[in-house]
Amino acid sequence: MIIVIDFGSQTCHLIGRQIKDLGVEVKIIDPETPIKEIKKMQPKGIIFSGGPDSVYGKNAPSIDKKIFILNIPILAICYGWQLIAYLQGGKVISGYKEYGPANLKINIQQPLFNQVESYSKVWVSHGDTVVKNPPGFVILGTTDMVKNAACADFNRKIFGVQFHPEVEHTVFGKEILKNFVKNICRLKTSKRKININELVLDIKKQVGRKKVICAVSGGIDSTVAATLIVKAIGKNSYPIYIESGLMRLGTKKEVLWIFKKNLKIYPIIVEAEKIFLKKLKGIIDPEEKRKIIGNLYIELFEKEAKKIKDVKFLAQGTIYSDVIESKGTKKADKIKSHHNVGGLPSRLELKLLEPLRYFYKDEVRFIGKKLGLPNKIVNKQPFPGPGQAIRIIGEVTKDRLIKQQQADKIVLEEIIRGNYYEKIFQSFSILTGIKSTAVKGDTRFFGEVVGLRIYDSSNIMTADWSHLPYEILERISSRIVNEVPDVSRVVYDITTKPPATMEWE
């Protein structure tokens, strides 16, 4: 077993996922867990996660120093490395900040960097930095900004890295974690498998003969979740699609096709665009938008549930990246609210059923393929629960909603036309709320700026902007400026995650 100590990192469970993918058992624990409890677990290795705090912060999480004399190999990541340096006599300061990609130069390869190239791209997200190593530590690698980017105390088998090997954009991240597990902790590795039958059996055990209403949106997550539930309980599942008016054009038609053709179930359609627009009138704060939309969805599901006898569960396509961004662990920072995370109001008297809660997007796609869903569904780009409301900066009005949907449709059409739809993770437009001067028909025009967010990722935890051919970007820009009313110009967002989130709101 490998123990992961969670200091609040957005990617803590991603560390666990990568270790599980090596066929090794993982347990995630809090830093307050007593040392005697850790010893009882008999781990072969310990990983300290990153976290949002500074080691000098008033309520910054720490660890019992006795952990360093257990003679168990330790790999400390980001905040975890800073904490070790701080507790062991090194020096940490605020400065040398890095967010996004950085270049790692390796000075000492064995054993952590075995089979890792001497120069490679890593992913970083930190404000504090170790500027003086604790006694006994040597430098294994550096970045352009950070001297102590990778360090080790070989005698005690303690390793610290300032970057995140668990994220996909660290090129040799999987190799680094495998080296720690295999070469340093001396554990055997194998390939992890997702057992679909076990997922179906779990649903059967939870639900029994009760009925389930499934919140569906036409997206991959809710479709896969609903498919698992249909496979488990058949016609005791009731997919419900709420037409909020905030989704992409044609979504309702797609939902009908998905469930009627592929699952032989006719979904319940609730027309509610007018209600959503009325509730969002005058609202400009992103978090308030999310909460209004989430609460309204729950109210409407509650209303529909009362029409069906013996409904005891509400199923949602929540995946782990949703949970993480909504402060999924005790030490984590909240990034943004997800309307399908955080439980249900007590009056609803329904239990949550979330069969995908601990899976990442790439795993959900794998499950979808195993369930036999068409590629059109499995490879569909994700779409946020609050829909276009969080892609319209400022107030959501009917007029602005129409413009956003038009611009969004153009983006998708040109991405598909250029054969890039399945090569990138997500692509969409944003009504920025910013106005700029343009010239149309030899006259001055003052109109809205549309942003483009197009990026590459697999699990949503990290992302890099897509290096699309200029011809595609040119066509998107030209069409939006010419076809969408009151738009003055189009700009391309080339910010990585971190520091930026996928959505602008």
Image (cartoon, grey):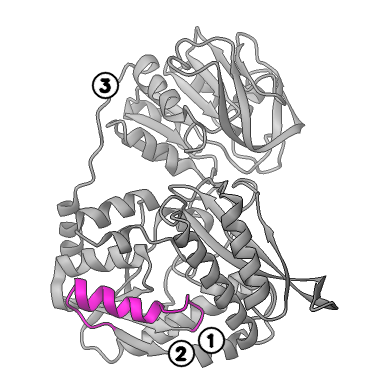
- Give the residue type that dot 3 points to: Lys
Quarter-of-image position of residue 297: bottom left
> What residue range appears in magenta?
245-267
Q: Is residue 504 visible?
A: no
Residue density around tag 2, few if under 14, some if 14–19, many if 20 or more, within 10 Å:
some
Q: Which mark is residue 86?
A: none
- Residue 323 versus residue 138 in the image, above or below: below
Residue density around tag 3, few if under 14, some if 14–19, many if 20 or more, within 10 Å:
few
Residue nearest the observer in this picture, 356 or 242: 242
Mark toward the start of the polypeptide (2 vs 3): 3
Provide the residue designation for mark 1. 276
Q: Position of residue 250 (x, y in %)?
A: 41, 79
Residue 338 shown left or right of residue 361 in the figure = right
- In the image, what residue occupies the spot 45% across and 24% down? 176
Provide the residue designation for mark 3. 188
Is residue 256 a member of the stretch shown in magenta? yes
Mark 2 near mark 3, Cβ–Cβ under 8 Å? no
Provide the residue designation for mark 2. 272
Q: Nearer the viewer, mark 2 or mark 3?
A: 2
